[in-house]
Amino acid sequence: MIRRQPKLGGFTNPTRETFEVVNIGTLEEVLPAGAYDLASLRESRVVDGALPVKILGEGKVTKKFDLTVNAASKSAREAILKAGGSVTFV
């Protein structure tokens, strides 16, 4: 049985992509309504670092945001579109 187990333990996915995540509730609290891209999100200190940005659907949105990001979850896209905004991907 021990011979069947791998020597090094687990599997590391070489193509895994790591994102810096931002919830839509955070956008609602911190930013006024408007258009934002990756540079303006970093400038306003919502995100920091050089990782790609992904928007997640935690929270509620009432403001109109026009976002240009690397990725967004389905629930985040639906909430932003419902509030009158738009999401485009880089």
Image: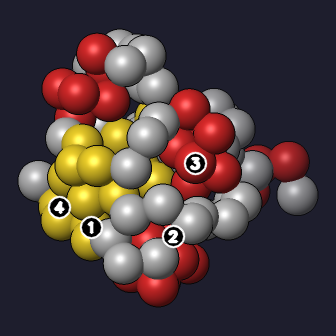
Q: Secondary structure at mark 1?
A: strand
- Tell me if 83 is positioned left or right of 26 in this view: left
* Foreground tag (4 vs 1): 1
Nearest to N terminus: mark 4 or mark 3 = 3
* Foreground tag (3 vs 2): 3
Disc 2 marks a residue whose amino acid type is Ala
Q: How packed is label 2: few (under 14 Cα within 10 Å), some, or many (20 or more)?
A: many
Residue to which mark 2 is pinned:
76
Q: Secondary structure at mark 2?
A: helix
Disc 4 marks a residue whose amino acid type is Phe
Disc 1 marks a residue whose amino acid type is Val
Residue to which mark 4 is pinned:
89
Q: Which mark, residue 28?
A: 3
23 vs 10, nearest the viewer: 23
Q: Distance of mark 2 from mark 1, alpha carbons?
A: 9 Å
Q: Position of residue 56 (x, y in %)?
A: 55, 58
Nearest to N terminus: mark 1 or mark 3 = 3
Q: Secondary structure at mark 4?
A: strand
- Quadrant location of residue 48? top left
Q: Is residue 23 visible?
A: no
78 vs 34, nearest the viewer: 34
Q: How packed is label 3: few (under 14 Cα within 10 Å), some, or many (20 or more)?
A: some
Residue to which mark 1 is pinned:
87
Q: Distance of mark 2 from mark 4, alpha carbons?
A: 13 Å
| Residue 42 against residue 33 in the figure, above or below | above
Q: Distance of mark 3 from mark 2, alpha carbons?
A: 12 Å
Tag 2 near tag 1, CB within 8 Å = yes
